[in-house]
Image: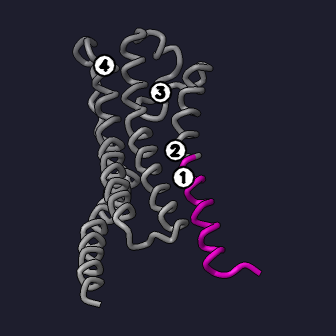
């Protein structure tokens, strides 16, 4: 029967690989959907495929690139979370790598949340750029997932600072012991 420590190490390694896989899979699936022509800007702009064809290649491509911003920020955050799990798997709970990775994961998650709130507006502006009066669209999205990403990212980012201070205090105390 494995000990509790080996079980923790095994689960931390599994979680790290799951984060890495997810960080690669989500953008890859989005690119595959675009390549196969099945992605329609339905998520943000609510357009059908005929309307997308009438917009032109530049506007459609720019809108697709903008829709990729939250996904890339989330993927970057997941890679930093994987580094945190690697530290847990290596039993480096109080090293300098873990709080740094935790702070970076939080900051990228905040960026992801901000992108989730801003990108729908930017996509609407890009898609209706140059349209005649009355055909322009301005959308404002205030979604719970964006706000929760900002909140959770702020939590991770704020945990970075006390963890670094605790490491410094532990190192200072180790000199006296």
State which region is magenta: 1-20
Residue 114: image x %, image y %? 29, 46
Q: Residue at x 41, y 9 (%)?
A: 56
Image quarter where the N terminus lies is bottom right
SS state under label 1:
helix
Horizontally, residue 143 falls left or right of residue 2, namely: left
Residue denoted by label 2: 23
Could you tell me how far apart the alpha carbons at marks 2 and 1 are, in whole angstroms?
6 Å
Residue denoted by label 1: 19
Pointer 4 or 2: first along the chain: 2
Residue denoted by label 3: 41
Q: Are marks 2 and 1 in contact (CB under 8 Å)?
A: yes
Indicate the quadrant where residue 171 lies. Answer: bottom left
Residue denoted by label 4: 128
Residue 138: which numbered mark, if any? none
**Is 31 situated above or below 37?**
below
């Amino acid at each position: 029967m494995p000990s509790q420590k080996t079980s923790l190490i095994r689960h931390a390694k599994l979680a790290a690989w799951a984060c890495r896989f997810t960080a690669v899979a989500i953008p890859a699936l989005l690119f595959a959907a675009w390549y196969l022509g099945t992605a329609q800007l339905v998520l943000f702009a609510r357009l059908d495929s005929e309307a997308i064809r009438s917009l032109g290649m530049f506007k459609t491509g720019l809108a697709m690139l903008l829709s990729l911003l939250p996904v890339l920020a989330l993927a970057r955050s997941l890679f930093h979370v994987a580094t945190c799990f690697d530290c847990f798997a290596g039993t480096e709970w109080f090293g300098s790598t873990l709080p740094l990775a935790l702070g970076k994961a939080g900051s990228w998650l905040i960026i992801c949340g901000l992108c989730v709130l801003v990108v729908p507006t930017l996509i609407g502006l890009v898609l209706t750029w140059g349209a005649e009066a009355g055909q322009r669209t301005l959308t404002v999205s205030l979604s719970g997932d964006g706000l929760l990403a900002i909140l959770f990212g702020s939590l991770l980012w704020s945990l970075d600072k006390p963890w670094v201070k605790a490491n410094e205090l532990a190192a200072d105390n180790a000199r006296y012991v």
